[in-house]
Image (spheres, helix red, strand yellow):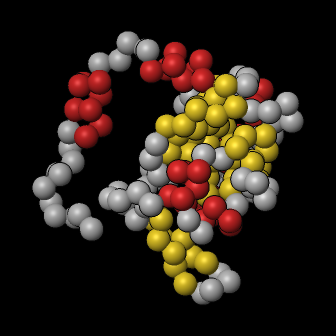
Amino acid sequence: MVKGGKNLGIFDPYHRKTLVMNSLIGEYDCKMDAKGRIMFPVNLRKQLEAAFDQGFVINRNLHQKCLVLYPVAEWNKLNKKLSKLNRLIKANDVFVRKFTGGATACDADTTGRILLPKALTEYADIKTDIKVLGSNNVIEIWDKKMYEDFLNQDVNIEKLAEDVLGGLNFNDGDDE
């Protein structure tokens, strides 16, 4: 189990209680087999705890050519927010359709493998060698070469950190 990080509450309907899952972290090298399956990283599985057995929804990432694997509780949370959008407004309708269009439910088999849908692996140009990343409340799945190219982009990380995090107060005592 990963220590620290934000706890994510996952409701277990079978036991009528909320399970706690830490933020997902780590970067793992994996291989996709000829049938499109990946062996889910053991350390990431341990971080997910009971959420792993509840299944996932996999979809395209909005900003990068990679896939996002949502624990089903995280997908349900997001989908609940999307369902509040007025679909009679064209922009909302188009967004929801484009965003959810590739979403596919998936479960791990008894050996811990997950089948990646062919259409999604083609979208993300995923070949054999892949990177699986814990990314807070979701898991990203990248083609290894594309992830390396992403990391090697010339980005001013100091400026990006200032733009993204500059307005946050890290001393406000919201630690759990």
Q: Does residue 98 appear left or right of residue 4 in this picture?
A: right
> Where is residue 150 drawn, in percent x and y?
49, 20
Q: Does residue 6 appear left or right of residue 135 in this picture?
A: left
Q: Which residue does the image show at 22% across and 32% down from the upper left?
A: 162
Q: Does residue 46 appear left or right of residue 121 in this picture?
A: left
User: Which of these two is toward me, 134 or 123?
Assistant: 134
Q: Which residue does the image show at 75% across and 47% down from the upper left?
A: 114
Can residue 137 be seen? yes
Q: Is residue 152 above or below residue 28?
A: above
User: Which of these two is toward me, 112 or 18?
Assistant: 112
Residue, far left: 171
> Where is residue 54 drawn, in percent x and y?
68, 66
Can residue 119 be seen? no
> Where is residue 71 drawn, in percent x and y?
61, 58
User: Which of these two is toward me, 52 or 59?
Assistant: 52
Q: Which residue does the image show at 78% across and 40% down from the upper left?
A: 37
Q: Looking at the rendering, in which quadrant would you find the N terminus? A: bottom left
